[in-house]
Image (cartoon, rainbow, N blue to C red):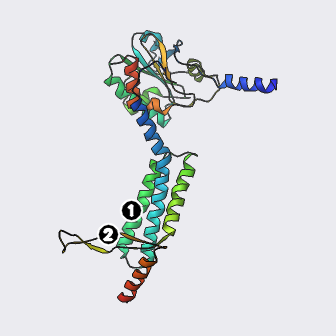
Amino acid sequence: MIDHSLVISPMTAILFHLKQGFFLYAWPMLIGFLTILGYQAMGRLAMSGAAKWPVVFVLASAVSMMSLFGWTMMVRGLHMIPFYGCGVGLASAVTSRVYAVTLPEIAIAIYPNLKIRSIRVIWRGDVNGIQKLQQALRARV
Amino acid sequence: MKILLLAILGSIALTAQGQVPRPAPALRIVEASGKTTVLSSYRGSVVLLAFISTRCTHCQNASLIFERLSHELAGLQVLEFAFNENSDAPAFAKQFGLTFPIGTGTTDSAHDFLGVSRGERIGTPQVVVIDRSGIIRAQSERLGSPILQTADYLRELLKAVGAR
């Protein structure tokens, strides 16, 4: 309760409520989302057998540390449960639609010799992308 | 119908708390050293009075903010009133490096000052801002007001009340 006759800049109150809103509602959702996304990515990489064990170890450690750090930063209370759940649900729904993640090399226009790897997601509905990936895998065998 | 109406009015009366602005009631803060401070002796200064529990982490964090503000703003007096059982105010002040007076008192005296019915649950810290003429200009909601525990907002509020 604040005396309404006091002249206080509304900006500080607005900033406070924005910050509070972010940590109360958006942060649990973000942590739920990133936790599932991280564990799914790590799990798929570990199960594929393509990555060396130190890579799997480092990635698994990083993902678990990230989720624990997020949980300690979270304002824990009953109100955060649905938001955390929404983040987890959203990440699970998104990852369930992913067919594969590839790291194709892309040449830079200015320096054609310099190639960098970028992340490319192939979605389950992308028939062309899936066919191209399967052809590439068959050609590799 | 009448009984229902009476029950609703009764419950509103039970959960009511003192409104702002209103004159600050009398309060005696007894420090561990035995020094007694009367709130009215700070008339002429802006007073930031916090009712705390020394074990509550929100109170500990807020106390650090109050300490910072007490050095930043001229004409501001910070006071704390610990009302949890077996509160060790000197140990609390030492642990968090607090230099303002911290007294102890009963839960009932905290409730009476805040205008909350005795026995009613209150969230700590309860922050009260009193202007130079002894009028309460801001007070936490009964279950606590996080905005009154943030440095930026408190600074603006205290300046609006008269601290410089």
Chain ID of residue with mark 1? A
Mark 2 residue type? Ser
Say above or below: B96 vs A72: above
Left or right? Give the position of B73 relative to A33.
left
The crowd level at tag 2 (other Cα within 10 Å; few <14, some 14-19, many 20+) is few
Give the residue type at disc 1: Ala
Compared to residue A33, the image places residue B82 above or below, namely above
Which residue is under mark 1?
A62
Q: Residue B127: give x, y in percent of width and height.
A: 48, 25
* SS type, badge 2: loop
Q: Mark 2 highlights which residue?
A: A118
| Point 43% across, 34% down: residue | A14
Figure check: A22 above or below A56: above
Q: Is residue A84 visible?
A: yes
Q: Which element type, helix, strand or loop, lies under badge 1?
A: helix
Q: Earlier in the sequence, mark 1 or mark 2?
A: 1
**Residue at the (37%, 18%) spot, across then down:** B76
Left/right of residue A50 with respect to residue B18 in the rendered view: left
Q: Rounded to the nearest whole Å, what is the CA distance between mark 1 and mark 2?
A: 21 Å
Name the mark on residue B124: none
Q: How many marks do you count on the picture?
A: 2
- Residue at 44% over, 61% down: A64
**Residue A43: x and y, percent?**
46, 71
Which residue is at the front of the view, A36 or A112? A112
- Residue A20 to residue B129: above or below: below
Q: Position of residue B35 (x, y in %)?
A: 44, 15
Q: Give the image location of residue B139, x and y in percent.
A: 51, 23
Q: Nearer the viewer, mark 1 or mark 2?
A: 2
